[in-house]
Amino acid sequence: MRDVIHGYLQGAEINDCGLTAATPAKTPLVWTYTANTGCPGTLTLIVDRGNTYQTTGGTVVTVEASHITISYPFQWRFHRIIKLVAPGSNYAGITQINADATMQNLD
């Protein structure tokens, strides 16, 4: 998953914050990557292969799934313009963009 996300970021010409060099913190089914090389904050990627959820309707079935969570530090470019409007002001303009996805484990 880390390599897929790196490929996506690279293809979109977005800094991967050093994700490819990050060593994950591991538990048996969860890998947590943190990277901040060349970024204004920290990129966090969590791959949880032990996630489960239950179906609804009819017979309830517990499904094993992978849950991927990413938090990316996005730096807004507004801070350059705010100085024209209000000289001496500062706007760091960093927002953590979060996304997640869950998919049934197929193996």
Image: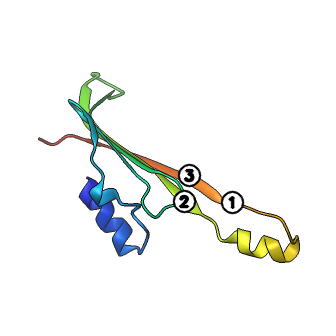
Secondary structure beneath dot 3 equals strand
Question: Where is 15 relative to 35, above or below?
Answer: below
Secondary structure beneath dot 2 equals loop
Q: Residues within 10 Å of mark 1 (few under 14, many from 20)?
A: few
Where does the image place residue 107, in percent across and percent down from the top left?
A: 11, 41
Identify which amino acid the numbered label 1 is placed on: Ala
Identify which amino acid the numbered label 3 is placed on: Gln
Q: Is residue 4 visible?
A: yes
Q: Nearer the viewer, residue 42 or 70?
A: 42
Where does the image place residue 43, in percent across and percent down from the top left?
A: 44, 52
Residue carrying label 1: 92
Tell me the number on the disc at residue 40.
2
Q: Residue furthest top?
A: 59
Identify which amino acid the numbered label 2 is placed on: Pro
State left or right for residue 97 relative to residue 80. left
Secondary structure beneath dot 1 equals loop
Q: Residue furthest left?
A: 107
Residue carrying label 3: 96
